């Protein structure tokens, strides 16, 4: 703190032991005594490892392709509560400096559910989650956008400040999928109606009407996912 420059005010990120939640919340791990009170603890979150790390079975664990059981949510909330009571409730900020999961050999909906749920559980407890993306897994660096727009909308919804509605969610189920494309096709053919609360979301190009152009936009959106 006394070495000059901006160091008296600099925020310091203190990595937890092995960046593991339980080990970092153990009484043997101690944060430094910082007179500036500008230290935050950092952990990573890849739990359960069979889903969040493994793409195939290994000698140390079995690969999981799905996530989202009651037990999975209980484990997530237990770990997040542990961080909150150990640090956040005592005025020590927590940054989840990495969390994520692969997509290979994983169910698409489980990937979305895991990533958005970890994000939501952290935000609910005033912690900062940072989605870790190996090159071009979840984020398209060449075009500066997420590959999965549905996942993007789910992540934005966690903070509650999405700048736009989930356009293309024609059936109002909270995601954009092939089911919305089928429903929009049937609507344009006059054989099925749109749910009242979701009708405006079928206007995918935002021109105030629902027609074949919206169908083309929705097809293009799904093709990019």
Image (cartoon, rainbow, N blue to C red):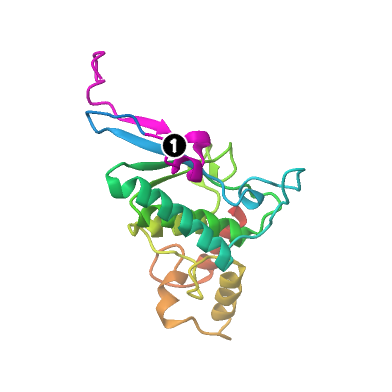
Residue 11 is one of the magenta-drawn residues:
yes
Q: Is residue 3 left or right of residue 146?
A: left
SS at circle 1: loop
Residue farthest along the top direction in this orientation: 3
Pinpoint residue 140: horizontal percent, then vertical percent. 54, 42
Pinpoint residue 56: horizontal percent, then vertical percent. 74, 47
Q: Is residue 125 left or right of residue 116?
A: left
Residue 154 is one of the magenta-drawn residues:
no
Task: Identify which residue is drawn at 42% across, 41% down.
Answer: 27
Pinpoint residue 103: horizontal percent, then vertical percent. 64, 50
Task: Identify which residue is drawn at 37% across, 47% down.
Answer: 86
Q: Quadrant of the N terminus?
A: top left
Please tell me whether residue 1 is drawn above or below residue 177 in the rendered image: above
Pinpoint residue 205: horizontal percent, then vertical percent. 45, 62
Rendered image quadrant of residue 36: top left
Count residues near mark 1 (Cα–Cα under 10 Å), then give few for <14, some for 14-19, many for 20+.
few
The residue where tag 1 is placed is 28
Q: Main secondary structure of the magenta part?
A: loop
Closer to the camera in the image, 173 or 132? 132
Q: Is residue 192 left or right of residue 97?
A: right
Please tell me whether residue 14 is drawn above or below residue 78 in the rendered image: above
Does the image show residue 217?
no
Tell me which segment is drawn in magenta.
1-30
Please tell me whether residue 36 is drawn above or below residue 66 in the rendered image: above
């Amino acid at each position: 703190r006394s070495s000059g420059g901006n160091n008296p005010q600099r925020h310091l990120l203190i990595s937890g032991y092995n960046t593991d939640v339980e080990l970092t919340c153990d009484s043997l791990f101690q944060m430094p005594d910082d007179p500036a009170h500008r230290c935050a603890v950092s952990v990573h979150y890849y739990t359960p490892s069979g889903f969040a790390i493994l793409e195939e079975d290994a000698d140390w664990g079995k690969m999981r392709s799905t996530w989202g059981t009651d037990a999975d949510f209980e484990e997530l909330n237990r770990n997040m509560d542990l961080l909150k009571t150990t640090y956040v409730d005592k005025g020590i900020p927590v940054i989840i400096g990495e969390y994520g999961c692969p997509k290979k050999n994983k169910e698409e909906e489980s990937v979305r559910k895991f990533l958005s749920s970890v994000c939501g559980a952290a935000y609910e407890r005033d912690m900062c989650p940072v989605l870790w993306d190996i090159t071009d897994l979840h984020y398209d660096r060449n075009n500066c956008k997420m590959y999965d727009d549905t996942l993007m909308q789910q992540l934005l919804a966690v903070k509650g400040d999405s700048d736009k509605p989930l356009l293309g969610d024609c059936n109002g189920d909270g995601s954009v999928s092939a089911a919305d494309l089928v429903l929009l096709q049937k609507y344009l053919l006059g054989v099925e109606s749109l749910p009242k609360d979701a009708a405006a979301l079928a206007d995918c190009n935002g021109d105030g009407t629902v027609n074949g152009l919206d169908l083309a936009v929705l097809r293009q959106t799904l093709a990019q996912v």
